[in-house]
Image: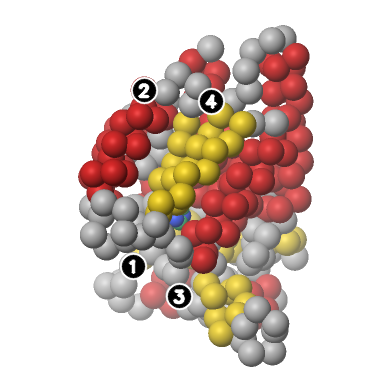
Amino acid sequence: MTILDGKNLANQLVIKIRTEVDQITSGGKRAPHLAAILVGNNPASRAYVGNKMKLCEKAGFRSSLIEKDSTCPESELLDLIHDFNKDPDLDGYIVQLPLPKHIDEQKVLNAISPDKDVDGFHPENIGKMTLGLPGFRPATPLGIMIMLENYGIETAGKHCVVVGRSNIVGTPVSILMSRKGYPGDATVTLAHSKTKNLPEIVRQADIVIAAIGIAEFVKGDWIKSGAVVIDVGMNRVEDSAVPRGYRLTGDVDFEAASSNASSITPVPGGVGPMTVFALIHNTLQAYNSRF
Ligand code: GUN
């Protein structure tokens, strides 16, 4: 059984990017620049954004974090986005989700210039992904593709069951897994809250991608012998036995699934670091298309 170590892989891949960035900057050009907008005080969002800023530093990128409190009016956020769209010294930026309830998330995503949308959430980039045209791919699905590729996991003709149909993971990863080429060419089932007989469907999967956001939702006996398990979940479960009061758990019962799977991503240290790497990858793509 192989542990798909996203932390180690992301670190290796970022070293390659660092070499490229060092060559660029030693030639006199400025470094790529990524900004993140964080609205409110969601502790998980704060931790994710912190990881994104840290990896920028490792990659030799410039990074900027703009923090707004949870009462920030929608119009103020949209003004900031318009400024970012025009800023020639900024290659890409993200607005960390979720946003406070008084802000219309789709309106915000629509306002991001598609050529700076390194999270790949703008409808133009989603459309380009669907059509197989060049553009930014959403960070988590792209991170999963990069991981499958680097571990040489076969996908052609495999049955991939995606559990969860969110706009940021389940739906786009189902599109990427079914596209022509590698990694892709899979037969994809997109399962969701209305799916009947979910355990039986998951039992048919050669590749399971769990992105439902419920701790240990996918049970060990749903995993076919030899299946590849990609766990996108990052759930905080109360645990008074540890000092911080919670532990992080994926959407898959890791211990039980490990005895059936041929390879599996751990949580933490699996898909999470690959998402952050994919953002760095997209930012370099944005920079290279500007210079
Ligand atoms: N919230 C959860 N995942 C993501 C992500 O990949 N990007 C952003 N912007 N917000 C998120």
**Is the residue marked 4 within 8 Å of ligand 1, measured from its CB?**
no
The furthest residue to the top = 27
Q: Which mark is residue 214?
A: 3
Q: Earlier in the sequence, mark 3 or mark 1?
A: 1
Q: Nearer the viewer, mark 2 or mark 4?
A: 2
Please give left or right for residue 169 compared with residue 250 in the image: left
Residue at 30% x, 76% y is 196
State how far apart marks 3 and 2 are (Cα): 39 Å
Q: How many marks?
A: 4
In the depicted structure, whether residue 215 falls above or below residue 95: below
Residue at image mark 1: 192
Pair 3/1: label in front: 3
Q: Is residue 173 left or right of residue 2?
A: left
Q: Is residue 111 visible?
A: yes
The reply to whether residue 181 is in sight is no
The amino acid type found where label 4 is placed reads Gln
Residue at x 56% of width, y 64% of height: 231
| Image coordinates for residue 142, horizontal then vertical, percent | 52, 43
| Residue type marked 3 | Ile
Residue 56 position (above or below residue 48)? above
**86 with respect to 101 (left or right):** right
Q: Which residue is mark 2?
A: 86
